[in-house]
Image (cartoon, helix red, strand yellow):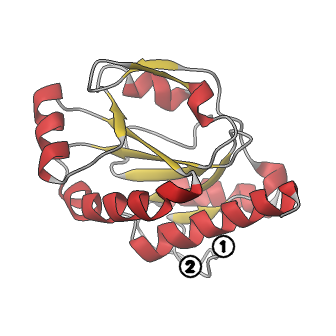
Amino acid sequence: MTLVGVVVIAGALAGCSGGEATDRTGSPDPAIVEIAEPDRVVVDDFEAVLLDGSEVSSSRLDGVVTVVNVWGSWCGPCRVEAPVLREVSQQYDDRGVEFLGLNVRDNDAAALAFERRFKISYDSVTTSDSPRVSLAFGGLLTTAAVPMTVVVDPERRVAARVIGAVTAATLRALLESVLEEADDRDGR
């Protein structure tokens, strides 16, 4: 197993308890991990219903950088990070970055009220489909740790994960890293 694989596992086990693992963002927090390209897990196929009643599938992740966030309206840290996610989603919209929420342990009415309150404009998967969708992420995304955020590269591989509320600076750094990789691959 590679060092990055060990850091990812340590992050999953340690949660927000501290530690000294360091990734490319310079974070000493094992809850923030970037995954080297050779060690990335491909997101399996999935289909799900969104809170607005429409459907989404894993093909939405193909060819674009995507941020996937696990959240619940009952979650205090989710309320803290909601404005951050909204701000960063708006900042990166013109760069083609997609955002997708996975609402967990909630009811649709409370989730929709949360989205209205925090002016969340990106789609979220319903509570009933979120656990199944999380399984498509090969163990790197779970509905048990809330909030949790992953960044998926254009090849539909998990490139980074944050356990706990993500800050704007951390999310921007992770996105810039993945976008730079994509630009380098495309020869830009």
The answer to which image quadrant residue 90 occupies is bottom left
- Residue 22 lies, with reference to residue 146, above or below; the image says below
Point 74% across, 41% down: residue: 155
Q: Residue at x 46, y 52 (%)?
A: 149
* Residue indicated by mark 1: 23
Please say if the residues under marks 2 and 1 sit with CB atoms less than 8 Å apart: yes
Residue 117, above or below 51: below
Q: Amino acid at mark 1?
A: Asp
Which residue shows up at 27% across the image and 57% down it? 82
Q: Residue furthest front?
A: 94
Please state which of residues 93 and 163 is positioned toward the viewer in this rendering: 93
Q: Is residue 83 left or right of residue 9?
A: left
Secondary structure state at the residue bearing disc 2:
loop
Q: Is residue 146 visible?
A: yes
Residue 164 seen in the figure? no
Q: Which residue is the site of mark 2?
A: 27
